[in-house]
Amino acid sequence: MRAGGAIDDAVWKSVHADLRYAPYLKRQATEIRRQASMETRRIPGWIDFASVEGLRNEAREALTRYRPETFGQAGRLEGVTPSDLTLLTIHARKEAKSARDR
């Protein structure tokens, strides 16, 4: 601080930057938590990757060949994109709900 209580320009710029980027940092923290939860979230063994609508052929082949146990493992396979993981997650939820409703 300068004499007279004025805020130093460097402090002001730092506070301003923190406020400006806070929403982006919050979104990134949420994404990090989501990724961490996917790391240990198990892929149901009953999923038939060939029946997942919209799954790219390259992803379907990699998933069928390696049969990953978790979504985190699946995400690290070459040929499996975040979109493929999203489709796989939706398929697993929908099929699990369908099985519960029977």
Image (tube, grey):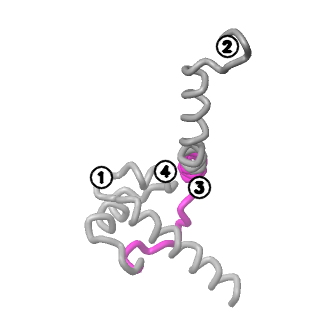
Image coordinates of residue 22 in percent, x first then y, are: 59, 43
The structure residue drawn at horizontal position 37% and vertical position 62%, both measured from the top left corner, is 63
- Quadrant in which the C terminus appears: bottom right
- In the picture, the disc for residue 41 is 3
Mark 3 or mark 2, earlier in chain:
2
Assign a secondary structure to mark 2.
Answer: loop
Q: How many marks?
A: 4
Q: CA distance from mark 4 to mark 2?
A: 48 Å
Mark 3 or mark 4, earlier in chain:
3
Q: Which residue is mark 2?
A: 1
Q: Residues within 10 Å of mark 3 (few under 14, many from 20)?
A: some
Q: Residues within 10 Å of mark 2 (few under 14, many from 20)?
A: few
Q: Residue 12: which quarter of the image? A: top right
Q: Amino acid at mark 1?
A: Glu
Q: Residue 58: which quarter of the image? A: bottom left
Q: Which residue is mark 1?
A: 78
Region of the chain picked out in magenta, as a range: 31-51
Mark 1 or mark 4, earlier in chain:
4
Q: Residue 25: which quarter of the image? A: top right
The structure residue drawn at horizontal position 57% and vertical position 58%, both measured from the top left corner, is 42
Q: Are marks 3 and 4 in contact (CB under 8 Å)?
A: yes
Q: CA distance from mark 3 to mark 2?
A: 50 Å
Outermost left residue? 58
Assign a secondary structure to mark 1.
Answer: loop
Assign a secondary structure to mark 3.
Answer: loop
Q: Which residue is mark 4?
A: 72
